[in-house]
Image (cartoon, rainbow, N blue to C red):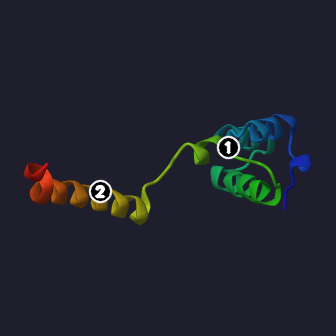
Amino acid sequence: MQQLTDMPKNVADALMRGEREEAIVALQQERNLSREDAREVIASCILLTPGLRMKDTLSEARWGRMGWLVLFQAIVVAIGYFVFFHGKW
């Protein structure tokens, strides 16, 4: 189990900036690890260090089922309004 204090300085700096991919590449070069091993070490470090937030995970917002359900409901309401109440105002 790796902690942030056990990491090389450039890896720790990349993690503090939220650059996970940069940290993986730097750790690969520093410790001569495979990409998979470096990813596992960085992932465990992220999980064990409270307060670390990665940029690439924050920027991706996925819709999920609830988002699609809300969109579908809005479309149904708009169509219903048009069909039933459009000419009555």
In the displayed structure image, the side of residue 15 where residue 1 appears, left or right: right
Q: Nearer the viewer, mark 2 or mark 1?
A: 2
Distance from the alpha carbon under mark 2 to that under mark 1:
37 Å
Locate residue 39, reporting x and y percent: 67, 53
Mark 2: amino acid: Ala
The residue lying at 81 percent from left, 35 percent from top is 13
Locate residue 76, reporting x and y percent: 22, 60
Disc 1 residue crowd, few under 14, some 14–19, many 20+, Cα 10 Å: many
Locate residue 14, reporting x and y percent: 75, 36
- Element carrying mark 1: helix
Between residues 72 and 25, which one lies in front from this camera angle? 72
Q: Of callouts 2 and 1, which one flags the residue occurring earlier in the amino acid sequence?
A: 1
18 versus 51 height, above or below: above
Judged from this view, the residue extending furthest toward the left is 87
The residue lying at 40 percent from left, 65 percent from top is 65
Q: Quadrant of the N terminus?
A: bottom right
Query: Dot 2 corresponds to which residue?
Result: 74
The residue lying at 82 percent from left, 55 percent from top is 50
Query: Dot 1 corresponds to which residue?
Result: 20
Judged from this view, the residue extending furthest toward the right is 5
Q: Which of the 4 image quadrants contains residue 26? A: top right
- Element carrying mark 2: helix
Judged from this view, the residue extending furthest toward the front is 89
Which label number is shown at residue 87? none
